Image (spheres, rainbow, N blue to C red):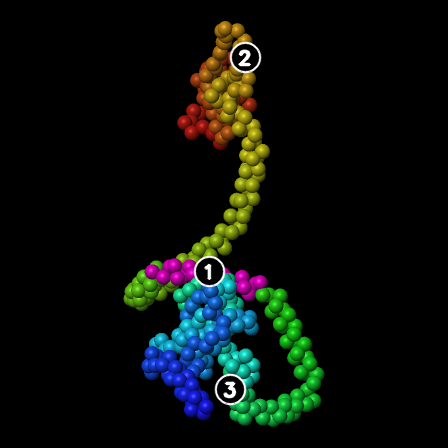
């Protein structure tokens, strides 16, 4: 009986060795063989690969989980360049976006490692994971392991300065002793400052946007700025060569300014007086503006007004009789009354004896018969 049992045991070992022989040097224990009953082997399952910076101590046949639910199994682990490449078989009813993330996690403090698949937290889901999909290295990572957490705590407790908190607290107590009111005032002023700064958030953002726009415009004008910077040294050299001439120019300009200021100071009273005298003339001209504009409409249709020209005849024809008086006295009275030449033509006509029954003009202050004839008539 014992020999029979030993024979059956040896046969089982031989079967296991025969199953492991095709793997060659890939044999890494029983865990390197596909195990029955694992997730992700049912109908419709698909294979997904993931690039990971570090696989820690994860092994083949490790669980693949989505939201703490096992949905697949790690089937292969290999090196790809400077990172690891995991091959996983996922159950067919699991739907994940194409930009899903893959992280190495730990079930509990001392539990086994697994691969956690999830939708991206910082981007909207895109597409869907399918058979042969690859999760890139940018979407991969690992949660802190128990060893890393304990090492960090040890560093904090031993060499991280936690033991110096008491010294820091004692130094702060000594520094603020007797200055509680100043500290309270400082905190209140800091609170007020932060409140004002918070109120100016929109202005700060607007100023930042304006600065960004200005920088963008400078960037657009970079070729122009480059040419300006290349031309500027030559321009400065020209200014340097013409420095003496420019200095002399500014001296002459200063002298001219002094002369102009002196002239304006001396003629200021006369200028003010002339402007005061021009004021009534301009006012009279402005007052006569409406009459002047209305009289212009008569020039083209003289002697009839333009406004009533279309109403002066109602039949098929019209008769008009005009008497044009071109005697010197009539021209004098009609055109030159009120001017410096008023009475000149009347005096000339009286001297020629051509009064035509007209009385002497009121503008003639002397007897026209004895006033000597002059070509320059007028006041």
Residue 264 appears in the figure: yes
Which one is earlier in the sequence, the residue at label 2 or at label 3? 3
Q: Secondary structure at mark 2?
A: loop
Q: In the rendered image, which quarter is residue 178 located in?
A: bottom right
Disc 2 crowd rating (10 Å Cα; few below 14, some 14-19, many 20+) is few
Q: CA distance from mark 2 to mark 3?
A: 119 Å
Q: Secondary structure at mark 3?
A: helix
Which one is earlier in the sequence, the residue at label 2 or at label 1? 1
Residue 175 appears in the figure: no
Q: Residue at x 46, y 54 (%)?
A: 263
Q: Residue at x 49, y 6 (%)?
A: 317
Q: CA distance from mark 2 to mark 1?
A: 93 Å
Would residue 226 be found to the left or right of residue 343 on screen?
left
| Nearer to the camera, 337 or 72 | 72
Q: Which residue is mark 2?
A: 312
Q: Which residue is mark 1?
A: 127
Q: Main secondary structure of the magenta part?
A: helix
Q: In the rendered image, which quarter is residue 258 located in?
A: bottom left
| Nearer to the camera, 194 or 276 | 194
The verdict on residue 222 being magenta is yes
> Does the residue at mark 2 contact the one at mark 1 (Cβ under 8 Å)?
no
Q: CA distance from mark 3 to mark 1?
A: 37 Å
Would residue 89 be found to the left or right of residue 295 on screen?
left
Q: Which residue is mark 3?
A: 147
Residue numbers of the magenta segment: 202-223
Q: Secondary structure at mark 1?
A: loop
Q: Residue at x 47, y 75 (%)?
A: 36
Percent of width and height locating residue 72: 48, 71
Residue 314 numbered tag: none
- Of labels 2 and 3, the one closer to you: 3
Percent of width and height locating residue 201: 58, 65
């Amino acid at each position: 009986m014992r020999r029979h049992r030993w024979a059956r045991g040896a046969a089982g070992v031989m079967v296991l060795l025969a199953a492991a022989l095709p793997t060659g040097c890939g044999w890494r224990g029983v865990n390197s063989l596909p195990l029955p009953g694992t997730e992700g082997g049912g109908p419709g399952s698909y294979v997904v690969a993931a690039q990971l910076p570090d696989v820690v101590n994860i092994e083949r046949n490790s669980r693949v989980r989505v939201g703490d639910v096992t949905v697949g199994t790690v089937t292969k682990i290999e090196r790809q360049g400077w990172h690891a490449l995991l091959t996983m078989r996922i159950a067919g009813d699991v739907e994940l976006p194409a930009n899903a993330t893959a992280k190495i996690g730990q079930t509990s403090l001392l539990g086994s490692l697994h691969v956690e698949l999830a939708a991206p937290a910082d981007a909207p889901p895109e597409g869907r994971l399918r058979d042969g999909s690859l999760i890139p290295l940018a979407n991969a990572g690992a949660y802190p392991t128990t060893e890393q957490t304990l090492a960090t705590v040890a560093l904090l407790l031993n060499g991280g300065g936690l033991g110096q908190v008491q010294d820091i607290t004692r130094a702060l107590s000594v520094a603020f002793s007797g200055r509680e009111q100043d500290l309270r005032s400082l905190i209140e002023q800091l609170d007020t400052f932060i409140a004002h700064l918070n109120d100016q958030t929109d202005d700060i953002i607007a100023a930042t946007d304006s600065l960004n726009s200005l920088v963008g415009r400078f960037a657009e004008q970079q070729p122009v700025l480059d040419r300006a910077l290349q031309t500027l040294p030559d321009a400065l050299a020209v200014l340097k060569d013409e420095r003496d001439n420019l200095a002399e120019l500014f001296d002459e300009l200063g002298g001219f300014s002094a002369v102009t200021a002196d002239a304006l100071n001396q003629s200021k009273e006369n200028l003010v007086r002339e402007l005061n005298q021009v004021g009534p003339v301009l006012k009279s001209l402005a007052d006569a503006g409406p009459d002047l504009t209305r009289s212009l409409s008569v020039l083209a249709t003289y002697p009839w007004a333009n406004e009533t020209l279309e109403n002066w005849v109602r039949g098929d024809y019209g008769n008009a009789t005009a008497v044009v008086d071109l005697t010197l006295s009539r021209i004098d009275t009609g055109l030159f009354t009120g001017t410096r030449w008023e009475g000149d033509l009347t005096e000339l006509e009286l001297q020629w004896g051509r009064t035509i029954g007209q009385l002497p003009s009121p503008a003639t202050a002397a007897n026209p018969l004895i006033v000597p004839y002059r070509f320059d008539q007028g006041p």
